[in-house]
Amino acid sequence: MLTFLAASLLVSGTVSPRATVSSLRAQATGCLPDAVLTEAATTLLVEDVAPTAGSLSAALAAAGSDLPSVQSLRAPLSDTRARDRFLRSATERADAPLVCGEAEGETTRVLLVAARGGRLDVDPASNTQAAPRLRVALARNFRDAYLAGRDGEDQLHRWPVDQEVLARGFDVPPDLAPPVVFQLVATGPDGPRPLSRRVVGERDDSAELLSVDGDDDLATRVATLRAHQGVRDLRVNRLLGAEAAAHAARVCSSGRVRHQGVEGDVDDPRERLRRRGIDARVVGETVARGRDLQAALRALSESPSHRMTLVDPRFTDVGYGTVRQPGGTCVVALFAAWPRYVPR
Protein backbone atom coordinates (compact mmCIF):
# COMPACT_ATOMS: atom_id res chain seq x y z
CA MET A 1 0.00 0.00 0.00
CA LEU A 2 1.46 3.35 -0.98
CA THR A 3 0.30 6.75 0.10
CA PHE A 4 1.24 10.29 -0.75
CA LEU A 5 0.93 13.66 0.86
CA ALA A 6 2.08 17.12 -0.12
CA ALA A 7 2.10 20.26 2.00
CA SER A 8 4.27 22.73 0.12
CA LEU A 9 4.23 26.48 0.64
CA LEU A 10 6.37 29.02 -1.21
CA VAL A 11 6.42 32.48 0.35
CA SER A 12 8.07 35.76 -0.54
CA GLY A 13 7.32 39.46 -0.35
CA THR A 14 4.87 41.40 1.83
CA VAL A 15 1.17 42.17 1.64
CA SER A 16 -0.71 45.42 1.75
CA PRO A 17 -3.79 45.33 4.01
CA ARG A 18 -5.61 47.42 1.42
CA ALA A 19 -6.05 44.49 -0.92
CA THR A 20 -8.20 44.14 -3.98
CA VAL A 21 -8.92 41.02 -5.99
CA SER A 22 -7.52 40.83 -9.49
CA SER A 23 -9.03 39.09 -12.47
CA LEU A 24 -7.44 35.70 -12.99
CA ARG A 25 -5.12 35.47 -15.97
CA ALA A 26 -4.59 31.76 -15.56
CA GLN A 27 -6.16 30.65 -18.82
CA ALA A 28 -3.26 32.23 -20.70
CA THR A 29 -0.82 30.07 -18.74
CA GLY A 30 -2.68 26.79 -19.13
CA CYS A 31 -4.08 26.98 -15.60
CA LEU A 32 -7.85 26.81 -15.21
CA PRO A 33 -9.48 29.43 -12.95
CA ASP A 34 -10.84 28.06 -9.67
CA ALA A 35 -13.22 30.31 -7.71
CA VAL A 36 -12.55 28.54 -4.40
CA LEU A 37 -8.78 28.96 -4.74
CA THR A 38 -9.31 32.61 -5.64
CA GLU A 39 -11.30 33.09 -2.41
CA ALA A 40 -8.54 31.42 -0.41
CA ALA A 41 -5.89 33.56 -2.11
CA THR A 42 -7.86 36.68 -1.20
CA THR A 43 -7.98 35.61 2.44
CA LEU A 44 -4.21 35.11 2.49
CA LEU A 45 -3.60 38.42 0.73
CA VAL A 46 -5.40 40.59 3.28
CA GLU A 47 -3.58 39.04 6.23
CA ASP A 48 -0.80 41.34 7.32
CA VAL A 49 1.55 38.50 8.26
CA ALA A 50 3.56 36.01 6.29
CA PRO A 51 1.44 32.92 5.58
CA THR A 52 2.27 29.61 7.18
CA ALA A 53 1.25 26.06 6.35
CA GLY A 54 -1.44 26.46 9.00
CA SER A 55 -2.85 29.69 7.57
CA LEU A 56 -2.83 28.18 4.08
CA SER A 57 -4.77 25.15 5.32
CA ALA A 58 -7.19 27.40 7.22
CA ALA A 59 -7.81 29.59 4.18
CA LEU A 60 -8.50 26.55 2.00
CA ALA A 61 -10.86 25.08 4.59
CA ALA A 62 -12.74 28.36 5.04
CA ALA A 63 -13.20 28.64 1.28
CA GLY A 64 -14.50 25.06 1.09
CA SER A 65 -11.68 23.61 -0.99
CA ASP A 66 -11.38 19.83 -1.33
CA LEU A 67 -7.76 19.99 -2.53
CA PRO A 68 -5.32 18.25 -0.16
CA SER A 69 -2.23 19.87 -1.67
CA VAL A 70 -1.82 23.43 -2.94
CA GLN A 71 1.30 25.37 -3.87
CA SER A 72 1.42 29.03 -2.92
CA LEU A 73 3.38 31.99 -4.26
CA ARG A 74 3.47 35.37 -2.53
CA ALA A 75 5.51 37.96 -4.43
CA PRO A 76 5.70 41.66 -5.26
CA LEU A 77 3.16 42.63 -7.89
CA SER A 78 5.92 44.06 -10.08
CA ASP A 79 7.85 40.78 -10.12
CA THR A 80 6.17 39.11 -13.09
CA ARG A 81 9.17 36.86 -13.58
CA ALA A 82 8.55 35.24 -10.18
CA ARG A 83 4.99 34.49 -11.21
CA ASP A 84 6.07 33.06 -14.56
CA ARG A 85 8.78 30.91 -12.95
CA PHE A 86 6.33 29.63 -10.37
CA LEU A 87 3.72 28.65 -12.96
CA ARG A 88 6.33 27.08 -15.21
CA SER A 89 7.70 25.01 -12.34
CA ALA A 90 4.19 23.96 -11.30
CA THR A 91 3.41 22.91 -14.87
CA GLU A 92 6.58 20.85 -15.14
CA ARG A 93 5.80 19.01 -11.90
CA ALA A 94 2.06 18.52 -12.45
CA ASP A 95 0.62 15.04 -13.00
CA ALA A 96 -2.84 16.44 -13.82
CA PRO A 97 -4.41 19.65 -15.21
CA LEU A 98 -3.62 22.75 -13.13
CA VAL A 99 -6.20 24.92 -11.39
CA CYS A 100 -5.36 28.38 -10.05
CA GLY A 101 -6.64 31.16 -7.86
CA GLU A 102 -5.03 34.61 -7.70
CA ALA A 103 -5.51 37.82 -5.72
CA GLU A 104 -3.67 41.12 -6.10
CA GLY A 105 -3.22 44.04 -3.73
CA GLU A 106 -1.56 47.39 -4.34
CA THR A 107 1.93 45.90 -4.16
CA THR A 108 1.55 42.14 -3.67
CA ARG A 109 0.02 39.12 -5.34
CA VAL A 110 -0.87 35.70 -3.95
CA LEU A 111 -1.19 32.82 -6.38
CA LEU A 112 -2.44 29.35 -5.45
CA VAL A 113 -1.91 26.42 -7.81
CA ALA A 114 -2.87 22.74 -7.62
CA ALA A 115 -2.88 19.71 -9.90
CA ARG A 116 -6.48 18.53 -10.17
CA GLY A 117 -6.36 14.73 -10.43
CA GLY A 118 -9.87 14.15 -9.12
CA ARG A 119 -12.53 15.51 -6.83
CA LEU A 120 -15.17 14.66 -4.25
CA ASP A 121 -18.40 16.63 -3.89
CA VAL A 122 -21.45 16.07 -1.74
CA ASP A 123 -24.48 15.59 -3.98
CA PRO A 124 -26.75 18.59 -3.20
CA ALA A 125 -29.84 16.43 -3.63
CA SER A 126 -28.68 14.14 -0.80
CA ASN A 127 -27.05 16.70 1.50
CA THR A 128 -30.01 16.83 3.88
CA GLN A 129 -30.33 13.06 4.19
CA ALA A 130 -28.91 10.91 6.98
CA ALA A 131 -26.66 9.18 4.47
CA PRO A 132 -25.54 11.65 1.78
CA ARG A 133 -24.01 10.68 -1.53
CA LEU A 134 -20.54 11.67 -2.72
CA ARG A 135 -19.90 12.42 -6.37
CA VAL A 136 -16.50 11.09 -7.46
CA ALA A 137 -14.51 12.20 -10.50
CA LEU A 138 -11.07 11.23 -11.80
CA ALA A 139 -8.80 12.92 -14.32
CA ARG A 140 -7.37 10.98 -17.22
CA ASN A 141 -4.42 8.70 -16.49
CA PHE A 142 -5.51 8.05 -12.89
CA ARG A 143 -6.41 4.50 -11.86
CA ASP A 144 -6.75 2.11 -8.91
CA ALA A 145 -8.85 4.65 -7.03
CA TYR A 146 -10.29 4.14 -3.58
CA LEU A 147 -11.91 6.14 -0.80
CA ALA A 148 -10.14 6.25 2.57
CA GLY A 149 -12.20 7.30 5.55
CA ARG A 150 -11.67 8.19 9.20
CA ASP A 151 -14.87 8.38 11.23
CA GLY A 152 -15.76 10.24 14.42
CA GLU A 153 -14.70 7.28 16.56
CA ASP A 154 -11.21 7.35 15.00
CA GLN A 155 -11.86 4.17 13.00
CA LEU A 156 -10.34 3.78 9.53
CA HIS A 157 -12.22 2.54 6.46
CA ARG A 158 -11.46 1.82 2.82
CA TRP A 159 -13.88 1.48 -0.11
CA PRO A 160 -12.99 0.73 -3.76
CA VAL A 161 -13.93 3.19 -6.48
CA ASP A 162 -15.18 1.28 -9.50
CA GLN A 163 -17.04 2.35 -12.63
CA GLU A 164 -20.38 2.17 -10.81
CA VAL A 165 -19.19 4.59 -8.12
CA LEU A 166 -17.82 6.94 -10.78
CA ALA A 167 -21.14 6.79 -12.62
CA ARG A 168 -23.68 7.09 -9.78
CA GLY A 169 -21.69 8.20 -6.73
CA PHE A 170 -20.84 6.72 -3.33
CA ASP A 171 -23.53 6.40 -0.67
CA VAL A 172 -22.04 7.19 2.73
CA PRO A 173 -22.81 4.27 5.10
CA PRO A 174 -25.38 5.56 7.63
CA ASP A 175 -23.81 3.71 10.57
CA LEU A 176 -20.53 5.66 10.48
CA ALA A 177 -19.97 7.97 13.46
CA PRO A 178 -19.76 11.57 12.21
CA PRO A 179 -17.84 13.48 11.17
CA VAL A 180 -16.24 11.28 8.51
CA VAL A 181 -13.13 12.52 6.73
CA PHE A 182 -13.08 11.11 3.20
CA GLN A 183 -10.06 11.04 0.91
CA LEU A 184 -10.04 10.11 -2.75
CA VAL A 185 -6.75 8.34 -3.51
CA ALA A 186 -5.60 7.13 -6.92
CA THR A 187 -2.45 6.24 -8.84
CA GLY A 188 -1.37 8.69 -11.51
CA PRO A 189 1.69 9.17 -13.71
CA ASP A 190 3.85 9.83 -10.64
CA GLY A 191 2.41 7.14 -8.38
CA PRO A 192 -0.42 7.15 -5.84
CA ARG A 193 -1.53 10.26 -3.97
CA PRO A 194 -4.60 11.81 -2.31
CA LEU A 195 -6.60 13.82 -4.83
CA SER A 196 -9.49 15.23 -2.83
CA ARG A 197 -10.75 15.53 0.75
CA ARG A 198 -14.24 16.10 2.12
CA VAL A 199 -15.73 16.03 5.63
CA VAL A 200 -19.28 14.72 6.01
CA GLY A 201 -21.27 15.32 9.19
CA GLU A 202 -20.67 17.33 12.35
CA ARG A 203 -18.58 16.35 15.35
CA ASP A 204 -20.13 15.27 18.64
CA ASP A 205 -18.43 17.56 21.16
CA SER A 206 -18.52 14.81 23.77
CA ALA A 207 -16.46 12.46 21.59
CA GLU A 208 -12.75 12.20 22.37
CA LEU A 209 -10.21 11.50 19.65
CA LEU A 210 -6.58 10.64 20.06
CA SER A 211 -4.40 13.74 20.30
CA VAL A 212 -1.04 13.16 18.66
CA ASP A 213 0.31 16.70 18.53
CA GLY A 214 3.44 17.42 20.52
CA ASP A 215 7.17 17.84 20.23
CA ASP A 216 7.71 14.23 19.22
CA ASP A 217 9.56 12.73 16.29
CA LEU A 218 8.34 10.50 13.47
CA ALA A 219 9.12 7.26 15.32
CA THR A 220 7.20 8.36 18.42
CA ARG A 221 4.25 9.48 16.33
CA VAL A 222 4.03 6.12 14.55
CA ALA A 223 4.36 4.20 17.82
CA THR A 224 1.57 6.26 19.41
CA LEU A 225 -0.80 5.70 16.50
CA ARG A 226 -0.09 1.95 16.36
CA ALA A 227 -0.61 1.56 20.12
CA HIS A 228 -3.90 3.44 19.84
CA GLN A 229 -4.98 1.10 17.06
CA GLY A 230 -3.93 -1.97 19.04
CA VAL A 231 -1.39 -3.29 16.53
CA ARG A 232 2.11 -4.54 17.25
CA ASP A 233 5.12 -2.33 17.54
CA LEU A 234 7.70 -2.34 14.75
CA ARG A 235 11.35 -3.27 14.61
CA VAL A 236 13.58 -0.44 13.45
CA ASN A 237 15.49 -1.71 10.42
CA ARG A 238 18.83 -0.08 9.56
CA LEU A 239 18.59 -0.75 5.81
CA LEU A 240 15.04 0.55 5.63
CA GLY A 241 16.18 3.62 7.54
CA ALA A 242 18.99 4.28 5.07
CA GLU A 243 16.58 4.23 2.14
CA ALA A 244 13.98 6.35 4.02
CA ALA A 245 16.64 8.97 4.80
CA ALA A 246 17.89 8.97 1.20
CA HIS A 247 14.37 9.43 -0.16
CA ALA A 248 13.58 12.21 2.34
CA ALA A 249 16.68 14.03 1.10
CA ARG A 250 15.58 13.58 -2.53
CA VAL A 251 12.11 14.90 -1.73
CA CYS A 252 13.44 17.98 0.05
CA SER A 253 16.07 18.81 -2.58
CA SER A 254 13.65 18.37 -5.50
CA GLY A 255 10.54 19.76 -3.85
CA ARG A 256 8.57 16.80 -5.23
CA VAL A 257 6.62 14.92 -2.57
CA ARG A 258 6.33 11.59 -4.33
CA HIS A 259 7.13 7.90 -4.00
CA GLN A 260 8.61 7.75 -7.47
CA GLY A 261 9.61 10.10 -10.25
CA VAL A 262 11.73 12.15 -7.84
CA GLU A 263 14.88 13.65 -9.29
CA GLY A 264 17.71 11.17 -8.86
CA ASP A 265 15.40 8.16 -8.47
CA VAL A 266 12.53 7.09 -10.71
CA ASP A 267 11.62 3.80 -9.00
CA ASP A 268 8.89 3.02 -6.48
CA PRO A 269 9.72 1.95 -2.88
CA ARG A 270 9.74 -1.77 -3.64
CA GLU A 271 12.26 -1.38 -6.44
CA ARG A 272 14.39 0.99 -4.37
CA LEU A 273 14.59 -1.63 -1.62
CA ARG A 274 15.42 -4.37 -4.10
CA ARG A 275 18.39 -2.33 -5.27
CA ARG A 276 19.58 -2.38 -1.68
CA GLY A 277 19.16 -6.16 -1.64
CA ILE A 278 15.93 -6.25 0.37
CA ASP A 279 12.89 -8.34 -0.54
CA ALA A 280 9.68 -8.20 1.50
CA ARG A 281 6.16 -9.61 1.36
CA VAL A 282 4.58 -6.16 1.56
CA VAL A 283 6.17 -2.71 1.23
CA GLY A 284 4.59 0.60 2.21
CA GLU A 285 5.75 4.19 2.38
CA THR A 286 4.44 7.51 3.65
CA VAL A 287 5.95 10.79 2.51
CA ALA A 288 5.18 14.28 3.77
CA ARG A 289 6.70 17.73 3.61
CA GLY A 290 5.79 20.62 5.88
CA ARG A 291 7.07 24.01 6.90
CA ASP A 292 8.41 22.37 10.07
CA LEU A 293 8.45 18.93 11.68
CA GLN A 294 5.13 19.36 13.46
CA ALA A 295 3.39 20.40 10.23
CA ALA A 296 4.74 17.32 8.43
CA LEU A 297 3.77 14.98 11.27
CA ARG A 298 0.31 16.51 11.55
CA ALA A 299 -0.23 16.05 7.82
CA LEU A 300 0.58 12.34 8.13
CA SER A 301 -1.55 11.86 11.23
CA GLU A 302 -4.66 13.58 9.90
CA SER A 303 -4.65 11.92 6.47
CA PRO A 304 -6.82 8.75 6.51
CA SER A 305 -4.86 7.05 3.73
CA HIS A 306 -1.53 7.80 5.38
CA ARG A 307 -2.73 6.66 8.77
CA MET A 308 -3.85 3.37 7.21
CA THR A 309 -0.27 2.73 6.20
CA LEU A 310 1.16 3.88 9.54
CA VAL A 311 -1.02 1.42 11.49
CA ASP A 312 -1.13 -1.45 8.97
CA PRO A 313 -0.82 -4.66 11.07
CA ARG A 314 0.94 -6.54 8.27
CA PHE A 315 4.18 -4.62 8.69
CA THR A 316 6.95 -5.90 10.96
CA ASP A 317 9.83 -3.50 10.23
CA VAL A 318 10.24 0.22 9.62
CA GLY A 319 12.87 2.78 8.74
CA TYR A 320 12.53 6.53 9.32
CA GLY A 321 14.02 9.48 7.48
CA THR A 322 13.75 13.15 8.48
CA VAL A 323 15.49 15.94 6.60
CA ARG A 324 15.31 19.61 7.57
CA GLN A 325 16.14 22.26 4.98
CA PRO A 326 15.41 26.01 4.76
CA GLY A 327 12.41 25.30 2.52
CA GLY A 328 10.78 22.85 4.93
CA THR A 329 11.01 19.49 6.65
CA CYS A 330 10.56 16.19 4.82
CA VAL A 331 9.68 12.95 6.58
CA VAL A 332 9.57 9.41 5.17
CA ALA A 333 8.47 6.22 6.91
CA LEU A 334 9.31 3.07 4.95
CA PHE A 335 7.58 -0.14 6.05
CA ALA A 336 8.10 -3.80 5.17
CA ALA A 337 6.61 -7.16 6.15
CA TRP A 338 9.27 -9.75 7.03
CA PRO A 339 12.08 -8.19 4.96
CA ARG A 340 15.10 -10.32 4.15
CA TYR A 341 18.48 -9.41 2.79
CA VAL A 342 19.27 -11.03 -0.56
CA PRO A 343 22.77 -10.06 -1.77
CA ARG A 344 22.84 -9.05 -5.44
Image: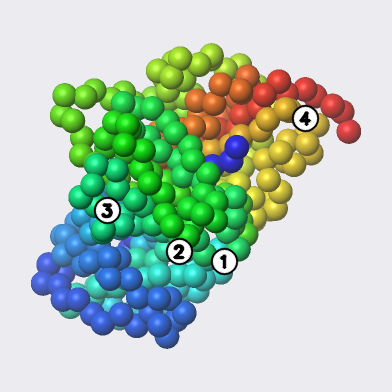
Estimate the spatial distance between the alpha carbons at disc 4 and disc 2, rounded to whole Å.
35 Å
Give the answer, above or below, for where 76 lies relative to 144.
below
Badge nearest the viewer, 4 or 2: 2
First of labels 1, 2 by sequence position = 2
First of labels 4, 2 by sequence position = 2
Please identify the quarter of the rendering in which residue 125 is found.
bottom left
Estimate the spatial distance between the alpha carbons at disc 1 and disc 2, rounded to whole Å.
10 Å
First of labels 1, 4 by sequence position = 1
Give the percent coordinates (x, y) of residue 220. Answer: 44, 21
Q: Amino acid at mark 2?
A: Arg
| C-beta proximity under 8 Å, tags 1 and 3 | no
Q: As rendered, which of 257 and 203 lies closer to the eye?
A: 203
Q: Is residue 258 left or right of residue 324?
A: right
Estimate the spatial distance between the alpha carbons at disc 1 and disc 3, rounded to whole Å.
27 Å
Q: Is residue 229 left or right of residue 57?
A: right
- Disc 4: which residue: 279
Estimate the spatial distance between the alpha carbons at disc 4 and disc 3, rounded to whole Å.
47 Å
Badge nearest the viewer, 1 or 4: 1
Give the percent coordinates (x, y) of residue 281. Answer: 72, 27
Q: Residues within 10 Å of mark 1 (few under 14, many from 20)?
A: few
Badge nearest the viewer, 1 or 2: 1
Q: As rendered, which of 78 and 185 lies closer to the eye?
A: 185
Q: State which quarter of the image contains the N terminus.
A: top right
- Disc 1: which residue: 140
Q: How many marks?
A: 4
Estimate the spatial distance between the alpha carbons at disc 1 and disc 4, rounded to whole Å.
33 Å
- Disc 3: which residue: 126
Q: Amino acid at mark 3?
A: Ser
Q: Amino acid at mark 1?
A: Arg
- Disc 2: which residue: 116
